[in-house]
Amino acid sequence: MTEIKEQKKEHPKEELIEKPFSDLKYSLYLGCVIPNRYPMIERATRFVFDKLGIELIDMNGATCCPAPGVFRSVDKALWLTLGARNLTIAQNNKTTELLTLCNGCFGTLHEVEHEMKSNPDINQRINKILAEKNIHFDGNVNVRQIMDVLYFDFGLERLKSLVKKTLNLRVAIHYGCHILKPSSTQLFGQDPDNPTFFDEVVETIGCQSIDYQEKLMCCGAGGSLRTGFKDNSLQYTIEKLRQIRKVGVDCIVVCCPFCHLQFDLGQIEVSKFLDDGEEEFRIPVIFITQLLGLAMGYEPEDLGMIKPEEPKGISPFVPFDKLLKKIESIPLDNQVQKIKTNAKTEAKPKAKTKAKTTTKGGKKL
Amino acid sequence: MPQNQKLLKYSSEYSDELSVDDELKKIRSCIQCGMCSAVCPSGSFTALVTRKIMRKALAGDHSVLSGPEIWYCSTCFNCYERCPRTIPVTNVILKLRNMAVREGYLPDALKNVIKNLTNTGHAVPLGGPDSKWAKLREYHKLKKVPPTVHSFPEALDELFTLLDKIKFNARIPYR
């Protein structure tokens, strides 16, 4: 634990909190699943950051991170080489912060960053390979994850100030694995068995994080398990979905597109494993920047939450309809305040007269 | 000669230089307590028994590479966090997978994903500017083709050069 604390001190997060939003800029690492399967996550994230005036610089020519499950398993040399190449794109963008919206990409890029910075032997070998294309990783890139940016760079206070619509939704949070573990390189300095950062963010923006059994369990998608043995990976998912259904929530909130896919498409795929008479799962899955956007009062359409009629067979697979209806019925906070103040001003004279009568009565007595 | 020498011997024989490091040696301190298996979510659904994987690896039992069990791990790192001997169990499994692949034991289902990466630069590619996913991007007011390697042919060339440089196509039996 002391190791983690020391690491936290080294991180320049406190400085960043003092900076105004407009000074923050990040290289946006999209990965594969977001741009090519769940583009609504890209849309919501770009939209929210744009509204906040925070610059996201595209990482032109970035490849797959490469995925920690498949490619780290298959060949570590490939994994390190392509990972380091991706880091150099952020470096060429002249940004020190690389923002990823995925736990898997974070797992790879953060680990590669760590290896390149802490292991001179690996650094030398990989840079020698990259030299073939005149690329060199200088070590001036910090790999960040969206939760870490929300928690440290935005900060809870500022997040709270952004809320224009208190949603008060009951949500099931899924942290995912690679944002928590290994704890020795985790960014939050929190116990991976008892993390709070995601809950804190969700509660700060006006929702209730509902605890459920197996909250910290893996979604099942990682480690090439979904790719290689999908039915095995769905066993994880159905277990988590059953526990989530038990506590009753409006939606599942994730910070990783692969977990997102596993919970969203997974709800259709687990149908074959349902017990006799067990109801199908239809719990909407939303990404943290979509939830933030909703809390900021933006329209679901701008956050990619309206699904087109065509083409068929696209994400999201679990419809948002019920959730959107609920959100539509929630007024903006200033409207609530207006109603409250109106109610107060209407009520005040009555109260005053009442008060007067009591004082009068009091005097009389 | 102690049994544990076996694994280290064949690891240096078959593995790429980069894969051989001190992490594998740490399994020598495994006391077979079973903590890794107790906290393994995959272990409750599949035939994966991490404790046995560690023992087989230590004993140089070849079936650890040829069997499917090491591929049932979802790399959640629970075992890595809990091992009382601080063996990086997850990383050991990843290394064993690297070794298995080099011996030709690559699960078929992974081959397509590897082909995707080596052909397009994405493990999950868009499928071209006319695919339904490109249409979905357009609907969401995004560039039809994302500003990744998909939009930059020179980046794809760069990827091919690097793959050649590490002799990936020659070393990995994915085709």
Image: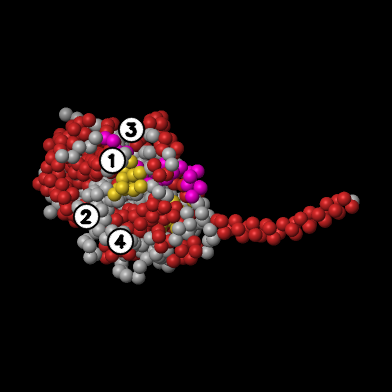
| CA separation in Å, label 1 and label 3 | 42 Å
Magenta-colored segment: predominant secondary structure: helix
Labelled disc at residue A94: 1
Residue behind mark 4: B137
Q: What range is drawn magenta here?
A: A139-162
Query: Mark 1 and 4 residues: CB-CB less than 8 Å, in contact?
Result: no
Q: Amino acid at mark 2?
A: Ser
Closer to the eye: label 1 or 2: 1
Considering only order in the chain, which callout, 4 or 2, is on the residue closer to the N terminus?
Answer: 4
Quadrant of the image for the N terminus of chain A? top left
Residue behind mark 3: B85
Chain for numbered disc 2: B
Q: Is residue A199 left or right of residue A231?
A: right
Does residue B93 show up magenta in the picture?
Answer: no
Mark 4 neighbour density, 10 Å: few (under 14) some (14–19) many (20 or more)? many
Q: Amino acid at mark 3?
A: Arg
Chain for numbered disc 1: A
Considering only order in the chain, which callout, 3 or 2, is on the residue closer to the N terminus?
Answer: 3
Mark 1 neighbour density, 10 Å: few (under 14) some (14–19) many (20 or more)? some
Closer to the eye: label 3 or 4: 4
Q: Nearer the viewer, residue A355 or A122?
A: A355
Q: Is residue A245 left or right of residue B170?
A: right
| SS label for mark 2 | helix
| Residue at mark 2 shares a chain with residue at mark 3 | yes
| SS label for mark 4 | helix
Q: Amino acid at mark 4?
A: Arg
| CA separation in Å, label 2 and label 4 | 14 Å
| CA separation in Å, label 1 and label 2 | 21 Å
| Residue at mark 3 shares a chain with residue at mark 4 | yes
**In x, y percent, where is residue A218?**
36, 49
Does residue A155 show up magenta in the picture?
Answer: yes
The quarter holding residue B136 reads bottom left
